[in-house]
Image: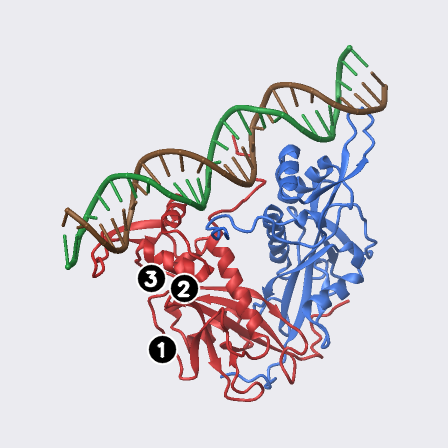
Chain colours: A red, B blue, C brown, D green
Amino acid sequence: MRSHLNTRAPLAHEVLAAVLQVRSDTLRVLLWRRALDPHLGRWSLPGGRLRPDEDVETSIRRQLAEKVDVRQLKHVEQLAVFSAPDRVPGPRVVATAFLGLVPSDVDPAVPEDTEWHDVDALPRTAFDHEAIVLRARDRLRSKLSYTNLGFALAPEEFTISALRGLYSAALGYKVSATNLQRVLQRRGLLIPTGHTAAPGRTGGRPAALFSFAAKDMHITDPFAVLKPPPRR
Amino acid sequence: MRSHLNTRAPLAHEVLAAVLQVRSDTLRVLLWRRALDPHLGRWSLPGGRLRPDEDVETSIRRQLAEKVDVRQLKHVEQLAVFSAPDRVPGPRVVATAFLGLVPSDVDPAVPEDTEWHDVDALPRTAFDHEAIVLRARDRLRSKLSYTNLGFALAPEEFTISALRGLYSAALGYKVSATNLQRVLQRRGLLIPTGHTAAPGRTGGRPAALFSFAAKDMHITDPFAVLKPPPRR
DNA sequence: TCAAAAGTGTTGTTGATACACCCATGA
DNA sequence: TCATGGGTGTATCAACAACACTTTTGA
């Protein structure tokens, strides 16, 4: 049987985050270039060691604060544990991976050795970090469909066509502005702010500005099938 | 910045599993009664320490093998990391939690101090194990709707009404046998075996037996909304 | 008055639920 | 032939996609 008190096999725990943002109509991830061996010169995810007094979410938020303003990080969620014994060289390190989202209207001041990379054209990455990025991308793509997670990609106020661009970049295919608006309106996620955006140089009807009703993630499309019977 | 080589803060990692099975029309979880302090007498999840040479999934499968025949464990998946610094008394232990599923037709030989408990009427549990059980229950409930995960709750061959019972117990509300069959058939998950079950004592048409087409989990209802455009 | 961009009206499709009806067996 | 449970046919409903059409602006 097991004992909670036995600590004979020390092991390190790190937290890593794939911080995603839509920039220039492309879904990007924040990576930094390793300045040390192992894997010198490869690109890796921000993060670091778990401290004794913090849980994993507190830890990743603390470590990201060095790179991204906390107020700019609209959403953070656990992805999975990566624990292959040889996932990093040297002493064993188990990692808890996170997804982080930054809205498209901010440009966080990031350190010199960091860059935003297209998630669909990653450079040579360190360790198992590519798998983590892809997991984050897939999680975002799923959740855009059945939650209100779009709020974490968008500015406070936005036009429907801007939102369409964000969804298209994140999902990897063109989304219809018309139907996107319908879906989000039906679910009560969109609030018209009453303001309008200035039309472009070439004219056109000025776009209405909207904001998201909620700024915390929740599920908007809970049951695809096998719904519970209605209460009478 | 971080270093992979620094191991100055040793910390233990354990794996825990909420193993679920439908027994007597109730969704149950396998718990064992702690024989040691802390939390002597409370009920806790099976699991134990992560060894240096195994990843977390290998580890939980090894540890469960002592309690449940591996061939009886039809599905295992990661739930989340539980990492509050004080989640267990004494030296810190971070846990990776899993969901495990056992089909309804087997009755694994379990140790003396282990019992199956109704997930909706848990006894006094140790540490944060209740939260883990509830997380496992919710994960199962969601996935029954948009994946083929039912295969992991059902015997190799089953009648639709037996399957209805399993889904109802797992979901916590009555499911219509008619519509359950329609949904699963439409998705191509059910294969008629050609066999029939003997009618009950009171007569009735003999039920046809079915099996699941796949025995690995996959998503059957991938996009609720914002579907990708059809390829031409 | 024309082009451009935003937004709405309308229709058709799909996947699901509800429920009536038919089927096959034991007593 | 009746009671009991199993299975199918069919109506209805809701969510969504597609697309035509209207609105509002700049030039």
Which amino acid type is shown beneath numbered disc 3?
A: Pro
Q: Mark 2 points at which residue?
A: A74
Q: Is mark 3 on a helix, strand or loop?
A: loop
Check if mark 2 and mark 1 are on a common chain: yes
Which residue is at 30% across, 55% downward? A159
User: Label 2 marks which chain's residue?
Assistant: A
Residue A216 at least partly seen:
no
Q: In this view, does A15 lie above or below B107?
A: below
Q: Dot 3 surroundings within 10 Å: few (below 14), some, or many (20 or more)?
A: some
Mark 3, residue position: A155
Q: Can the viewer see residue B99?
A: yes
Q: Name the residue tied to disc 1.
A: A109
Q: How far apart are marks 2 and 1 (CA)?
A: 16 Å
Q: Do the residues labelled 2 and 3 touch (CB within 8 Å)?
A: no
In the figure, residue B111 lies in which quadrant? Answer: bottom right
On whether disc 3 and disc 1 are found on a single subunit, the reply is: yes
Which badge, 2 or 3, comes first in the chain's sequence?
2
Q: What residue type is labelled 2?
A: Lys
Q: Which chain carries label 3?
A: A
Q: In this view, does B206 lie above or below B47?
A: above
Which chain does tag 1 point to? Answer: A
